[in-house]
Amino acid sequence: MSHPTILDVEPGSPAAGAGLTTGDELVSVNGVVPVDVIEYQQLVDDPELDIELIRGGDPVQVTIDKAPGAPLGIRLSSSIFDRVQTCDNHCEFCFIYQLPPGMRQSLYLKDDDYRLSFLYGNFTTLTRFTELDLARVIEEKLGPLYVSIHATDPEVRAAMLRNPRGATSLRWLRGLLEHGIDVHGQIVLCPGVNDGTVLEQTCAEIVARYGRLASVGIVPLGVSRYATGMSLRAHTAAEAAADLDIIESWQATAMHHIGRRLFQASDELYLMAGREVPATAAYEGFPQHENGIGMIRAFYDEVTRLEAGTHDGLPQITGEWRTIQSAPATGYRAPTVTMRSKRPGGPGPAVIVTGAYGAIALRPLLPRLEALAGRNLRILEIPNDFFGGNVAVAGLLVGQDVARALQADAGPAGLYVLADSALKGDVFLDDISLAEVAAAASAPLLAVPPSAESLVAAVAA
C-alpha cells in the first residue's frame, strides 16, 4: 500500500496548527491505516486524532484536538491508498483501446473500482465487485454509484465485456438497488450488437427488474481512427433515429409503470439523427449531464435564464469528492487554469472555437449570444483530425488540431474562446499546453468553463 502525500494545508486549520505540512505522507489515523479517502474522512471526523506521518523519510507522530466533524484541513494526493481495482474486461468499444501510443500514462488506466464510481462518477461494470464490497457500500451508504449495463441478456453482455463474469455481475446491481443505494446506469450502443431488439429487451428488463435505477443514460459508440482491427462501427443517421424511437417508446412505458422516463439518450444520438433535442422535462434534472446527456438543452435553458436576468440552475458536477475536503479533483474534474492573454483583445468579433457537434448546437443561438454579449460572434468549427472517426465533441479536441486551425484561420478575430473541458489543468489531451496553442493564434485565446454565462462574460464587449 502506498501512502498518500499531503498536497495542501489550509491556513488556520487544525492541521496547520499541528504542524502538518505539504509533502508529509499520511500513514495512519488513530492506529488505523485507511485504504481510501472515504475511510480517511470517517476517521478524521473524530475530535481526538493521533496521526502517524512520514516526513523526509522519518516517522512523525502528531496529536490533534478539534471539534467533532470539523475538517482537518488538508488535501491529499490520491483518493485510493491501497490499489485501484483495475478493469479486467476487454470491451472492444472501450475508448482506451482506441488511443494512440505516447499519450499521458494516466489516460491508459482502466479502472473498475466502485470507490471511484462513488467519488467521481466513473462507470463500473461490477465484474470485480464482491460480497465485502456490497456490505461496505450498504453499511456506509456509498451512493450514488454509476454502473455500465450495456445489455441485460447474459450472453450479449458477457460477449460485449469479453468477460464471462459479465453474464452474472448484474446480480450486484439488483442487490444495490434492493438495499436503497442510488445507482445511475449506462448503455453504450454498438450498432448490430446491443441496439434494435437487444435494446428493446434491455429496456424491458430494466423496467421490470431494475426500475429503482435513478437514471439510464444511453450513448452511442465512439470510434477513433486508431481503432485498428475493430469490428464495431459508428451509427448511421437511420440507425440513430431507430434507436431514438426505441428509447422514446420506453420512456413512455417507464413513465406509465414507475412514474419516471428513466431512459435518456445522449445529445450525440440526436445530432446523428438530425433531430432536435428534447424539452427540459425529459431530462428529469439532468442527472447524466457530464455523460453528454442534456448538455445542449441545459445550455439553451441557461441562455434563456440569462436573457431573463437570472443565473441559477446549472447541473451539478458528478461525484462525492466535492464533499470530502481532502479528496483531490482528478480527470476532467480537475481545475482548469483559465489563461487570459496579456495581449489586449482586438476590435473584431469573438470567435468560438469548438468541434462539429458544438457548432451544430451553437449556430441557432448565435444571434441571442451576440445580444447578450453586445459583440459580434463567429464560430470556428475544428475537425478532430487527431482522433478521426466519429469523434466530434469539443471536450476531445487536442492542442495540435486547435493550433493548426487557429494558425490557418483567415477570418476577422478580436478574441478566440474555447471550452476548458478539452483541458486538464492547462494541457490538452496530446500534452500540448494552452500557452503553446495561444501562440499560434492571431488574437488572444481564452479557455472558459462550458457554460453560457462563462462564454458571455468572456466575450462581452
Image (cartoon, rainbow, N blue to C red):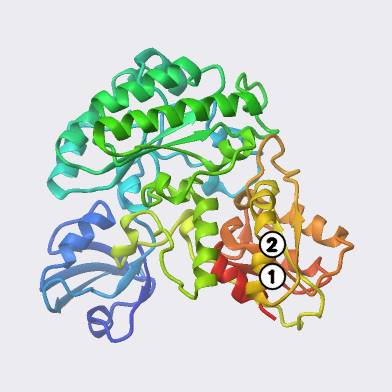
Marks 1 and 2, how far apart at CA: 6 Å
Give the x, y percent position of residue 187.
Answer: 43, 31
Give the x, y percent position of residue 288.
Answer: 42, 47
Give the x, y percent position of residue 176.
Answer: 21, 36
The residue singled out by tag 1 in the image is 370
Q: Looking at the image, do the residues carrying marks 1 and 2 touch, with CB atoms under 8 Å apart?
A: yes
Q: Is residue 24 above or below residue 343?
A: above
The three-letter amino acid code for the residue at tag 2 is: Leu
Q: Which quarter of the figure has residue 431?
A: bottom right
Badge 2 local density, few (<14 within 10 Å), some, or many (20+)?
some
In this view, the residue in front, 225 or 215, is 215
In this view, the residue in front, 241 or 120, is 241
In this view, the residue in front, 376 or 87, is 376
Q: Quadrant of the C terminus?
A: bottom right
Which element is circle 2 on?
A: helix
The residue singled out by tag 2 in the image is 366
The answer to whether residue 340 shows anywhere in this view is: yes
Q: Which quarter of the figure has residue 390?
A: top right
Q: Is residue 368 left or right of residue 58?
A: right
- Outermost residue on the top side: it is 155
Q: Is residue 225 above or below residue 294?
A: above
Mark carried by residue 242? none
Q: Which quarter of the figure has residue 325?
A: bottom left
Q: Report the residue at 87% width, 58% height from top.
A: 408
Q: Is residue 371 left or right of residue 2?
A: right
